Image (cartoon, coloured by chain):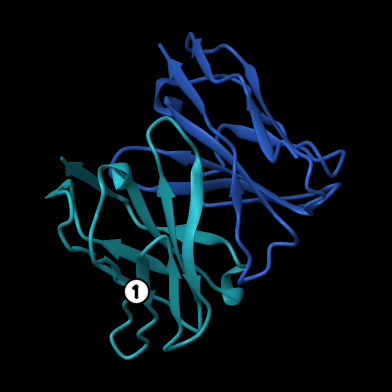
Amino acid sequence: GDSVTQMEGPVTLSEEAFLTINCTYTATGYPSLFWYVQYPGEGLQLLLKATKADDKGSNKGFEATYRKETTSFHLEKGSVQVSDSAVYFCALSEEEYGNKLVFGAGTILRVKS
Amino acid sequence: NAGVTQTPKFQVLKTGQSMTLQCAQDMNHEYMSWYRQDPGMGLRLIHYSVGAGITDQGEVPNGYNVSRSTTEDFPLRLLSAAPSQTSVYFCASSYNGGQQETQYFGPGTRLLVL
């Protein structure tokens, strides 16, 4: 079945550092890919998404490109802030599996000032 | 709009007790779902519904029941709580569950079963 693998955390960075969180997936068809973010004590909210190969999703300075050849959707940000400290989840949705969201384990990001 | 709301925020149960976690949305979404979040495992789908009167099982349905009598509400019932059901529970909704749709999550219910 479908699956999502994320780099293990926690990831600890200083403010203004460059961020990469790796995400790879396994799917049978052509899934949509998502990054969701969970701030402390809150539910998940969509950060960005891409629905076809080579699409780039972007929001709040974060970017991720849908790479079908490497089955990856890595999250990047050029300069992180303390307010970016959160848990980041990579996820996919595929029509062959009823469009259910399949999540990675999540990566904790801690940004120090 | 309130979005997706969940009650209670936190609950402690004893093994064998029953309870209902409430979920409501005011966005007129057809698709609603329940997930549980456990450390190191991401979110796993428990049950979902594609519209009023229609429900189906997700990845980890055992020990949970759901019903969907209205578009707005999607309660999750634990009939006989077990310590393995200690988790954080999230309800989510989307317009009609399409592959490209954003899902909107509630703030979660933290459940501790002793």
For residue B45, above or below residue A73: above
Residue A31 lies left or right of residue B68; in this view the side is left
Callout 1 secondary element: loop
Instruction: Report the number of numbered marks.
Output: 1
Residue B54 location in percent, x, y?
81, 51
Residue B50 location in percent, x, y?
76, 56
Q: Could one spot residue B24 in this view of the protein?
A: yes
Residue A25 lies left or right of residue A112; in this view the side is right
Image quadrant in which the C terminus of chain B is located:
top left
Q: Residue at x 69, y 41 (%)?
A: B3
The one nearer the camera, B99 or A83, is: A83
Image quadrant in which the N terminus of chain B is located:
top right
Q: Colour of chain B?
A: blue
Residue A15 location in percent, x, y?
17, 49
| Host chain of mark 1 | A
Disc 1 designates what residue?
A: A73
Q: Residue at x 18, y 55 (%)?
A: A16
Which chain: cyan? A
